[in-house]
Amino acid sequence: MSSSAVLLPILLLLVGLVIGVVIGYLGALARRTAAHQSEGDQVAELRAQAAQWQARAEELSSRTQVAEERAGRDGSVLRALAPVRSQLEQVGARVESLEKQRAEQHAALAEQLRATALREQDLARPRPVWRGRCAHARRAACGVRSNWPGSWRPPG
C-alpha cells in the first residue's frame, strides 16, 4: 500500500470533518439568529402589550379622577338637600297617618249608614196584628180574665 492510498482516506476524512464542522457552525448560527429573531418578536409583542396596558391604566386613572370629582359635587348637592329630604319624610308620615284615619272614619261611617238603613227598614216594615193580643185587650177592657199568662207574647 502506498502512502497515497493511506493518505487519501485520511484527507477525505479530514475534509468531511471540516465540512461537518462548518455545516454545524452554520446551523448553530441559523438557530441562534432564529432564536434572537423570535425573542425580538416576543420582546416587541410584549412591549406593544405593555404600551396598551399603560394606555388603559391612564384612561382608567382619568375616569377615576372624573368620577371622584362628580361624587364630590353630588355629595355637596346631597348635603344641601338633606333638610328637604327630612321634611319629605315627615310629610310622608303625616300623609300615611291621615290616610289611616280616613280609612277608619270611612269604616265607621259605613257602619253607621248600615245601622241607619236597618233601622229604617225595621220601621218601614208593617207590624202584624195578632188576634190573640187584640182579643186579650178586648177581654181585659170588658173585665174578663184570661187563662193565658200575662207574660205571654206571640212570636215576631
Image (cartoon, helix red, strand yellow):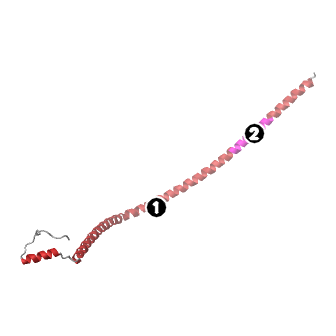
Q: Which residues are magenta?
A: 22-38
Provide residue 70's location: percent of width, then percent of height.
Answer: 46, 61
Q: Residue at x 63, y 48 (%)?
A: 46
Marks 2 and 1, Cα distance to the nearest angstrom? 61 Å
Picture mark count: 2
**Dominant SS in magenta:** helix
Is 130 placed above or below 89 here? Answer: below
Residue type beneath disc 1: Arg
Is 71 placed above or below 5 here? Answer: below
- Residue lying farthest left? 143
Q: Nearer the viewer, residue 3 or 142?
A: 142
Residue type beneath disc 2: Leu
Q: Residues within 10 Å of mark 1 (few under 14, many from 20)?
A: few
Q: Residue at x 39, y 63 (%)?
A: 78
In the visual, does 25 lie left or right of 91? right
Is 122 contained in the magenta span? no
The residue where tag 1 is placed is: 70
Is 50 placed above or below 28 here? Answer: below
Q: Quadrant of residue 23?
A: top right
Quadrant where the N terminus sits is top right
Q: Residue at x 26, y 72 (%)?
A: 114
